[in-house]
Image (cartoon, rainbow, N blue to C red):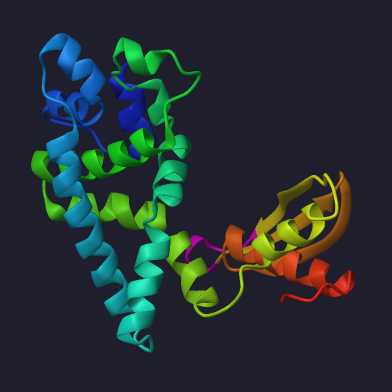
Amino acid sequence: MELSELEKNIGYTFKNKNLLKKALTHSSYSHENKVESYERLEYLGDSILEFISSKYLYTHYKKLAEGEMTKIRADSVCEDNLYSVALRHNFNEFLYLGKSEKTSKSPRKAILADTVEAVIAAIYLDSNLENAERFIIDNIKDEIEYASQNVGKKDYKTVLQEKLQAEGKVTIKYNIINEKGPDHNKEFTAEVLINDKRTQIGVGRSKKLAEMEAARKTLEMLNIKEQ
């Protein structure tokens, strides 16, 4: 696929297309083709991501203590969330991988997470910090909101999964069944299905918060203790 499709996905058009290509180039490909990989970009992008997420937390969550902000930042920009960002924008379809990495059915989670940090750096080098910041916040603000609402609280989705699957094989699925309101004040409704049967619904300011509430209500309905 053309890199222009990825540019549409991330909402930024590169002046220097080689920067974007480098941000998507894994070391396995670089060794085989004698080109530079994304590793140096990843290093820079990691620092930018930490700074911008810290700035966002400091500016928008004034009641949080230092330790709470540190915990929320770590939860928001973890590998799993960066991996989700990569999948959301179909990074997996644009990677430059060597033969050793192409043998697997899909790119490893760590690779996709790393490329998000590399793309952040590439955007910064191609333009300015403001564009990099826009990409970061657009993609992690929901995760920050989710983490801020649940700092110090239990992860009800994890508790539900652990409790039910301890008793045998159980499928647990979450679906967003409704969303309303303007972009700056969205409200989402999620349902949780156990073995394809709806048990509860939850409402929240983000998709994750709605799913968490649905899980919490399911635990309550089933009289399952959190500990």
Q: In percent of the image, x 26 and y 38: which residue is there?
A: 12
Location of residue 4 by image quarter: top left
Q: In percent of the image, x 42 and y 63: which residue is there?
A: 75
The answer to whether residue 1 is above or below residue 227 is above
Relative to 26, 165 lies left or right:
right
Q: Closer to the camera, 87 or 16? A: 87
Q: In percent of the image, x 80 and y 45: which residue is there?
A: 171
Relative to 164, 210 lies left or right:
left
Q: Position of residue 85 (x, y in %)?
A: 42, 44
The answer to whether residue 26 is above or below residue 118 is above
Quick check: can you spot residue 30? yes
Relative to 13, 64 lies left or right:
right
Q: Where is residue 21 in the image (x, y as percent from the top left)?
A: 20, 24
Q: Where is residue 107 in the image (x, y as percent from the top left)?
A: 42, 26
Location of residue 186 by image quarter: bottom right
Q: In the image, is residue 224 part of the stretch drawn in magenta?
A: no
Q: Closer to the camera, 38 or 174? A: 38
Number of dots carrying numbers:
0
Q: In percent of the image, x 28 and y 54: which residue is there?
A: 134
Quick check: can you spot residue 123? no
Q: Closer to the camera, 56 or 157? A: 157
Q: Position of residue 225 (x, y in %)?
A: 79, 76
In the rendered view of the protein, which quadrant contains the N terminus? top left
Please report the bounds of the magenta region as a residue range.
180-185
Location of residue 63 by image quarter: bottom left
The answer to whether residue 25 is above or below residue 47 is above
In the rendered view of the protein, which quadrant contains the C terminus? bottom right
Q: Closer to the camera, 24 or 160? A: 160
Relative to 163, 147 lies left or right:
left
